[in-house]
Amino acid sequence: MEESIDKNLNTLLQLKYGLVGISSEMMRVKRKLMQVAPTDLTVLITGETGTGKEVFANAIHGLSTRKKYPFVSVNCSAIPENLLESELFGNERGAFTGAVEQRKGFFEVADKGTIFLDEIGEMPVGLQAKLLRVLESGQFSRLGSSDIHKIDARIIAATNRNLEEEVKKGNFRQDLFFRLKNVQLHLPSLRDHIEDIPFLVDYFAKKVCDKIGINFQGLSFDAETLLKALPWNGNVRELKNMIETMITLEKAEYITPETLRRYIPQGLPPADTKPLAADVSLMPYETFEEPKKFELELIFRTLLELKHDTEGIKRAMNALNAKIDSIKENVADMGSSNSKKYSSYEIYDENEELNLEQKEKELILKALKKYHNNRRLAAESLGISERTLYRKLAEHNLSLKKY
């Protein structure tokens, strides 16, 4: 039941809001998002740069009762400090040099809707008090005016900083931090859910391919392994930008390691490990081996995957042999009852094609049919990993939609 709910949840969030991923880390955040979205609670979204904080904020607004009203996104770090107050709360004519007319701020524009304050950790301490007042009472004053205005806007804030540390340093108000943290959604870095990379690549690539009019064929197993080995300091945003650029320039319908390597940023040059002379060195120098090359590490990873796959195939073949032995026994029993002996080879049709690859394909189809296309249960029944099942489906040109 829970798996069915998660499947429906993933379909909704991916198709409508672009939230892609089935890893346990992403499912945890998605379930919490579905709980908080229908409420009016203030939400604080944390996580590294590029993890998709604004995408999640937009989904919260879209799943709320305020979805018919504006969603206003403000990047607090992109607006100069002396203009941020005016941008947020508006200003009266003549409030400062250049203020030639009365102007509404973002909060007034977002009335009855949602305002998303990105990079809230960059907001000046003096302006934080005014924001706290809006959170507490919904009241504010335009710059250059003492008139009180009241608005009803839900606030979602986001930051890549550790606000608890900023509070200790005096850079962020503690009372504002507690008020923002009604609900906190922490988005994992891409390094912490690399199993979602194939799904993210498929999502981004198909969007670009649809735009430029080509048919995306997928990602090779070696290319997937290569992508999962990268550090992804820029997280999902970095992956998205690389895929969009590569597909657009290469017109790549099928992604291979050769294609990827042309777009992977080159690493820094190796450090100079030449020891200093004894008379100028402050510390004794210990020699060490040169770090292994990335390609060598990739080979080891690939060999490990092959080992796992081979073990999975052995388990599947053992199961097949057991079934064949069972069939032999049944045929032998039938032969005894009819006073006829059959040799071991006579249980097969002489014209039957004894092809290992075909038998493997048939086993996969039977498992998928038995478990109604549930890839996890099918893989467990075959004694292989879910990743291996995906690779076998690709090798045999099979699609889950067909069965």
Image: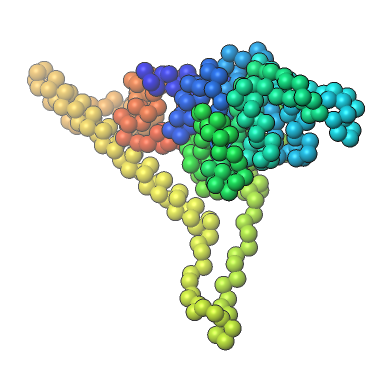
In this rendering, the answer to whether 170 lies above or below 37 is below
Q: Residue furthest front?
A: 146
* Image-quadrant location for residue 176: top right
Q: Position of residue 149 (x, y in %)?
A: 72, 19
Residue 362 visible in the displayed image: no
Horizontal side of residue 349 vs 3, given as left or right: left
Of 295 and 61, nearer the camera is 61
* Image-quadrant location for residue 313: top left
Of 279 and 259, nearer the camera is 279
Of 36 and 303, nearer the camera is 36
Q: Position of residue 76 (x, y in %)?
A: 70, 36
Horizontal side of residue 111 vs 378, given as left or right: right
Horizontal side of residue 355 vs 36, given as left or right: left
Q: Across the whole image, how many numbered discs are drawn on residues?
A: 0
Residue at 48% across / 69% down in the picture?
289
Which image quarter is the C terminus in? Answer: top left
Residue at 31% across / 29% down in the picture?
381
Q: Position of residue 353 (x, y in %)?
A: 36, 29
Q: Position of residue 258 (x, y in %)?
A: 61, 47
Residue at 90% across / 27% down in the picture?
100
Q: Which color scheme did the rendering employ for the protein?
A: rainbow
Horizontal side of residue 361 vs 202, given as left or right: left
Residue at 23% across / 29% down in the picture?
323
Which image quarter is the N terminus in? Answer: top left
Of 338 and 242, nearer the camera is 242
